[in-house]
Image (cartoon, helix red, strand yellow):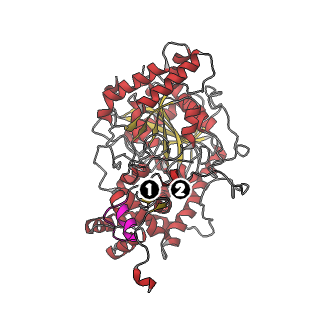
């Protein structure tokens, strides 16, 4: 039962074959059985979840209307504020932080009658590509427990893959939804910047961060996007729906895009492992059989995306994380003798290595004498990268590329070499810099039975077409239906 | 090639960042940040003469609303997460030392 898709569970519930309480109980049994191994959750809320599920059951029984996610057990990444439980960001500095309000996406999930089962693990402050930077918990890849689940939304992706929830919300600043989705063989969607409210999402890189769904299928992704998308007066960077209208992302999902034009960037793809490339080109062959045309393009500035990203994201992070001062909320050192030490010791003891490294890098890039050479330069390169996309989208509907250069790597393999870890994000980062939507869809396995994903990118605010393109592939394949042996 | 960033600079940036680093961290960050900055140096290969910096990708500029009084969190909720409080206040160590009053 826990391996149904969210839409299938919804049908089963509305047909009266299972109650919302039973669905939630099964998920908590699965969590009790598997999460001691997987480590996907930082906190779970069985009491509250079962109470909410019982309430939805009562409303269904009395014929009252219920929301589009009625009774579906979901997880959220622990960087989204909730009035229940702590919002830790997997950091010691926020370990005991209890948010005074719900993030807008949490309000929307609750209004849609989703049953939130828990808050999932992540790299501290969403900084990382493996979830190894969590200060609170270790999450392993359900496909091979000696390997990382990817990051930074490793907890949500592992939970969806292992049947510890039906769908989840992650956040994506440089690939943090798509990379773990690829490593765990689930579907990860980063919507267009501005499509989903960031109100109540703990900020990392504010011009790049975006919340999106992690699900078993493309259809579930559309279902979740329907619930979370939209303008929010509390987030001034969420887009006005008159400028970029919303639509029902499920409505035309099964209608293929006619005469699809797919762009590929051969020189860029050549950087990926052979097996990853093979899976990508096999996926593209399938699209060709469905009538797609493939156009080879050159995007010279993509090679500079990582360099630009690690200046821009860290600069924004150094500013955003200045708020952790040991005064207003969060951890305070008890060794501080004066007010400067309240800051410097609380931050030294509260932040992990990667967070410190990024704050340092960002502070350096913004500091006097280096601002023009690093920060300003990176913003200009960002514009060139966006220009690369704009040019390609004039003649193509989408771009396809790998999600990551390799499949899931071993725990500990890259943790002492930050630059090598950063290079895992080479294929995902450009979408954040350009603000466009991108999705990761399961497209095969390597010789070690580790999942491989294909990434599809489309122009800003065309999630409807992006999801339809992804659905064309999913409808012809059954990669998404395979489950990790541990979860069977 | 000289390292992109030396220990003195790392210590200065740590001070600006309000991060107290151990000697071991200073050494480690000097090596790691140098490697990252070497990589970032790639950006200088590109001619960006006349290219506008792009701070964000949205087709919007300013977002205004009426300047109306709205409900706020209130004192209790605002102070609920304070590591230390004194009544209605956040409690911090003395900021001015006594000599400044002389």
- Chain ID for label 1? B
**Disc on res. B82:** 1
Residue A174 seen by the camera: yes
Q: How many marks?
A: 2
User: Relative to residue A312, is residue A25 drawn left or right?
Assistant: left
Secondary structure, mark 2, is helix
Q: Residue at x 59, y 27 (%)?
A: A68
Where is residue A406 drawn, in percent x and y?
A: 37, 43
Residues shaded magenta? A332-347
Distance between mark 2 and mark 1 Cα atoms: 49 Å
Where is residue A270 drawn, in percent x and y?
A: 43, 47
Name the residue at the bottom extreme. Answer: B102
User: Relative to residue A62, is residue A126 drawn left or right?
Assistant: left
**Disc on res. A300:** 2
Secondary structure, mark 1, is loop
Quarter of the image with the C terminus of chain A is top left
Front position in the image: A405 or A311: A311
- Whether A131 is among the magenta residues is no
């Amino acid at each position: 039962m826990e391996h149904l898709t969210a839409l299938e569970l919804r049908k089963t519930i509305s047909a009266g074959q299972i109650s919302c309480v039973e669905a939630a109980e099964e998920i908590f049994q699965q969590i009790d059985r598997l999460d001691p191994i997987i480590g996907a959750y930082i906190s779970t809320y069985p009491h509250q979840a079962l109470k909410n599920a019982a309430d939805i059951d009562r409303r269904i029984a009395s014929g009252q209307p219920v929301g589009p996610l009625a009774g579906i057990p979901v997880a959220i990444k622990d960087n989204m504020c909730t009035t229940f439980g702590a919002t830790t960001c997997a950091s010691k500095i926020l370990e005991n932080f209890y948010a005074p309000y719900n993030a807008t996406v949490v309000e929307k999930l609750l209004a849609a009658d989703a049953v939130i089962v828990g808050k999932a693990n992540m790299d501290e402050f969403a900084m990382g590509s493996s979830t190894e930077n969590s200060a609170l918990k270790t999450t392993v890849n359900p496909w091979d427990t000696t390997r990382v689940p990817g990051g930074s939304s490793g907890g949500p992706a592992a939970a969806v893959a292992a049947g510890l929830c039906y769908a989840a919300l992650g956040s994506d600043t440089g690939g943090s939804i798509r990379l773990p989705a690829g490593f765990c063989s689930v579907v990860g969607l980063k919507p267009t910047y501005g499509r989903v409210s960031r109100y109540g999402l703990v900020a990392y890189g504010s011009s790049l961060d975006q919340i999106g769904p992690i699900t078993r299928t493309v259809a579930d992704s559309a279902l979740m996007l329907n619930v979370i998308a939209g303008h929010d007066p509390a987030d001034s960077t969420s887009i006005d729906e008159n400028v970029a209208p919303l639509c029902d992302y499920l409505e035309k999902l099964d209608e293929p895009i006619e005469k699809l034009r797919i762009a590929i960037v051969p020189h860029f793809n050549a950087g990926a492992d052979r097996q990853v490339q093979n899976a990508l080109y096999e996926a593209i062959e399938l699209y060709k059989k469905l009538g797609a045309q493939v156009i080879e393009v050159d995007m010279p500035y993509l090679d500079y995306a990582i360099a630009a990203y690690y200046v821009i994201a860290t600069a924004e992070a150094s500013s955003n994380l200045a708020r952790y001062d040991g005064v207003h909320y969060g951890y305070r050192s008890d060794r501080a003798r004066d007010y400067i030490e309240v800051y410097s010791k609380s931050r030294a003891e509260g932040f992990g290595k990667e967070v410190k490294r990024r704050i340092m890098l960002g502070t350096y890039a913004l500091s006097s004498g280096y601002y023009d050479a690093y920060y300003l330069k990176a913003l200009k390169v960002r514009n060139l990268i966006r220009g690369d996309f704009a040019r390609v989208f004039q003649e193509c509907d989408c771009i396809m590329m790998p999600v990551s250069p390799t499949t899931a790597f071993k725990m500990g393999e890259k943790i002492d070499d930050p630059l090598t870890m950063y290079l895992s994000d080479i294929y995902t980062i450009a979408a954040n810099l350009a603000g466009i939507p991108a999705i990761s869809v399961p497209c095969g396995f390597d010789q070690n039975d580790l999942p491989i994903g294909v990434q599809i990118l489309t122009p800003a605010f065309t999630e409807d077409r992006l999801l339809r393109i992804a659905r064309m592939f999913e409808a012809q394949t059954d990669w998404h239906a395979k489950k990790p042996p541990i979860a069977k | 090639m000289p390292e992109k960033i030396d220990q003195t600079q790392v210590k200065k940036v740590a001070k600006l960042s309000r991060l107290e680093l151990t000697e071991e961290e200073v050494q480690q960050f000097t090596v790691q940040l140098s490697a990252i900055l070497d990589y970032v140096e790639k950006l200088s290969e590109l001619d960006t003469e006349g290219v506008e910096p792009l701070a964000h990708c949205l087709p919007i500029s300013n977002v205004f609303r009426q300047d109306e009084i709205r409900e706020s969190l209130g004192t209790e909720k605002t102070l609920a997460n304070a590591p230390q409080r004194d009544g209605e206040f956040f409690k911090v160590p003395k900021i001015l030392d006594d000599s400044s009053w002389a």
